[in-house]
Image (tube, rainbow, N blue to C red):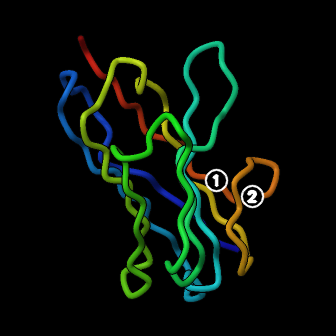
Amino acid sequence: QVQLVESGGGLVQAGGSLRLSCAASGRTFSSYAMGWFRQAPGKERDIVGAITRSGASTYYADSVKGRFTISRDNAKNTVYLQMNSLKPEDTAVYYCAAQLSFRLLTTAPEYDYWGPGTQVTVSS
């Protein structure tokens, strides 16, 4: 089992940047595929990006391609989401998720473990 805690959210102006971090407990972090999701009020929880347990493969939603970068540091049990050129429509609660898998997982039902989320607000 793994426990996840996100940090790095906040209020930023459009065009700005934020870096989210997700710290995981446990000694087997490198066995987990990781994902970042977001949920705006009244909307479903959508994939933002995903990364395999080795970090060799990544996936991005079309809406964030070229602006967001997912990465991980297995020595620090942490996955990151670098968000650049932020837009008001990026405003949401951002969640990290983990699942024991060697695959690249891109849908919410594939993940068993979730953090509590961190709010990102982008002002226009």
Crowd band around label 1 with a 10 angstrom C-alpha radius: few (<14), some (14–19), many (20+): many
Amino acid at dot 2:
Tyr
Question: What is the tally of numbered marks visible in this picture?
Answer: 2
- Place of residue 26 in the rendered image (x, y in percent of width and height, measured from the top left): 56, 81
If the image is split into quadrants, where does the C terminus sit? top left
Vertically, is 38 above or below 28? above
Vertically, is 15 above or below 4? above
Give the residue displayed 64% in from the left and 53% down from the top. 114
Q: Which residue is mark 1?
A: 114
Amino acid at dot 1:
Trp
Residue 48, quarter of the rendered image:
top right
- Answer left or right for 18 relative to 79: left
Crowd band around label 2 with a 10 angstrom C-alpha radius: few (<14), some (14–19), many (20+): some
Give the residue displayed 25% in from the left and 15% down from the top. 123
Q: Which residue is mark 2?
A: 111
Q: What is the residue that sits farthest to the right in this orientation?
A: 109
Q: What number is the disc on residue 21?
A: none
Residue 46, quarter of the rendered image:
top right
